[in-house]
Amino acid sequence: MKHNVLIFLAITLVLVTSGCQNNADTSNAWVQVEQVEPSYRNLMPVPASLELQKGKFYLDDSFQIVIQGEPDKRLYAAIGRTVKRLSGRTGLFLPQVFFDRDDKPTAPQMIIEVKKPAEIQFGMDEAYQLDISEKRISLKAETDVGALRGLETFLQLLDADAQGYFLPALTINDSPRFPWRGLLIDACRHFMPVDVIKRNLDGMAAVKLNVLHWHLTEDQGFRVESKTHPKLHELGSDGFYYTHEQIKDVIAYAADRGIRVIPEFDLPGHATSWLVAYPELASAPGPYAIERKWGIMDPTFNPAIEETYIFLDAFLKEMTSLFTDDYVHIGGDENKGHHWDKNEKIQAFKQDMDFADNAALQNYFNQRLLSTLKSNGKKMIGWDEILHEDMPKDIVLQSWRGREAMITAAQRGYRSLLSNGYYIDLHQPTDYHYLNDPLPPDSPLNEREQTFILGGEATMWAEFVSPEIIDSRIWPRTAAIAERFWSASSVRDVDDMYRRLKITSFHLEELGLTHEKNYPMMLRRLTGNRDVSALKTLVDAIESVKTYNRNRQRTHFSYTPLTRVIDAARPDAEVARLFRNDVTDFLENGASDKTISASLIQRLQLWASNHEKLLVVIEVSPILHEIRPMSENLSAVAKLGLEAMMAIESGDKAGREWLKQSATIIEQAGKPVAQTELRILPAIEALVGFVE
Ligand code: ACM
């Protein structure tokens, strides 16, 4: 073995030192020039149909747009924004950044034809047709919202060659697969100021999402001003709430982008912050304080007293006039009924009313809310717990505990959305969400039942996000989920999704989203403004622990800082994913592919020597002390990976002692450190496992 290893090491050193001298950065942050595909291959979501034609439409300073038909004024503003993004990318001086509805250019190259304004409600028409030829661009849509969707596609089609910026000649006919394509933003666990909501609305519009589900009340915060019951926001919010003016502003901003805003008032559980102001409406005696911990809490409205309904009737009346969507979300999730069980009067009420269980009691509560909503002209949506045979068929259920709830609901004639599998707060990889189809080919639902599946929503629960990092949890993964809701179910090539996602992610940045740019900034802060390269090498290779394990491993509170290494680390770490893919390729193609093996070795060497460099920084950055064992693990497993590669390439058998040591190193590295996990580990294990 020794001789082979020496030759191998020599080759390795030559490869590493010659090709990759200045490339200490494994993050692969840039799309390599030779990897850039023509723009029509990069669309996300993929349109329903695309026919490529011959030719290119070149853009220059004379580019002008004209509108025909009767759109809402939102389209004029949208054209201004589109032109601004276009000029921002191209450097062209385009006067229609200030688009004027009375503008009648003599020789417009782009004609947008819209029949009528859309009403921003469920079921709005979002279809469009985009025709690009060498001399002309035509965008046609029944509604202005269709035109907005088409403008986003138009921007994604911008391409460049030596002659300049152009769009490829083609015809696109496009419309969504599902009518309800949402993102939930929890503004309660951590408050999200209006600008955070707005930049995410821009991101949503860019990938053709059409519902912002705004989670506004929780144990940890009551986030909406109430003029009828001001104690609610005064006592329940720590001062962090949206005023009516801000809410109206956000609704208008969303409507301008063809996005509905659905408020959620989570009832009867998840209610601590309401009960701070109104303990007399609770099921257990107060006083109550705003909750600082995470988890499922007991404070619950008392469903057995009329005062609860008088209060909620007035509150919901106020909210239904503030929010313009036909639907209001009443929550309904995770009411364990502990405080109901302990309250004798509630038990007596249950008996008097002949309710078999707490579910029946909660259904009674929901029915009372339903009649309030109906009398205010609204429809109800709630989490899957609200499904009950007494509920009318015009409610919508949001399935989160499993897809079975969605299937059962559809079989019983209820409409529903899928959120199970789209919990982006749980740090699962993009392909996991992407391949989660509300209606996969093997769906047990018949044709009629399938029409009851309205779409889905990604859920950005906010226990572990601040305004600084929320974008990096939403984006770019939510763009892949948006494609799942918009594009045909047959669009499911994971490699191609990742390729396009990277391009989409860069496009999303121009909207002010911070998912890419905050990462280096957070690393700088962690090192106290010292060199971040070694820290970046580590953080690129790790992720947060998954699902609900973060809080299990260390109790967090609403005041816990979200500035630690785990918070800088991003979901679905690209470096780790590419390493896993390359190891798989390497092992499948045998050791014959020298390019892959050289590149793997380069990465392994970088990691192997990283701890020594990072230690210098860790020692003077106390906030990094907790991550030291992870840094040691990274280097230890990288050395192991190098040894495994040497053995594989030389065809040597592993000694028993080496295998034993490897198992110990791998076991050690498999333990979470500071609630993070080493995402390159499975690939190292695969390499080691290959050595026999
Ligand atoms: C939920 O995640 N409790 C709806």
Image (cartoon, rainbow, N blue to C red):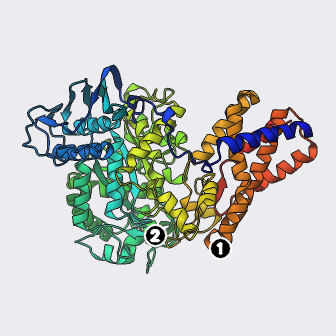
Residue for point 31% across, 53% down: 262
Question: What number is the disc on residue 469?
Answer: none
Q: Is residue 394 visible?
A: yes
* Local SS, label 2: loop
Could you say which quadrant of the image residue 28 lies in?
top right
Q: CA distance from mark 1 to mark 2?
A: 44 Å
Residue for point 37% across, 66% down: 304
In depth, the one of 49 and 303 nearer the eye is 49
Q: Which residue is mark 1?
A: 620
In the image, taking residue 605 as reference, residue 561 lies left or right, namely left
Could you say which quadrant of the image residue 57 lies in?
top left
Q: Is residue 418 visible?
A: no
Q: Earlier in the sequence, mark 1 or mark 2?
A: 2
Question: What number is the disc on residue 299?
Answer: 2
Q: Amino acid at mark 1?
A: Val
Q: Residue 88: horizontal and vertical position, in percent?
A: 30, 47
In the image, taking residue 69 as reference, residue 46 lies left or right, namely right
Q: Residue 12: horizontal and vertical position, in percent?
A: 76, 40
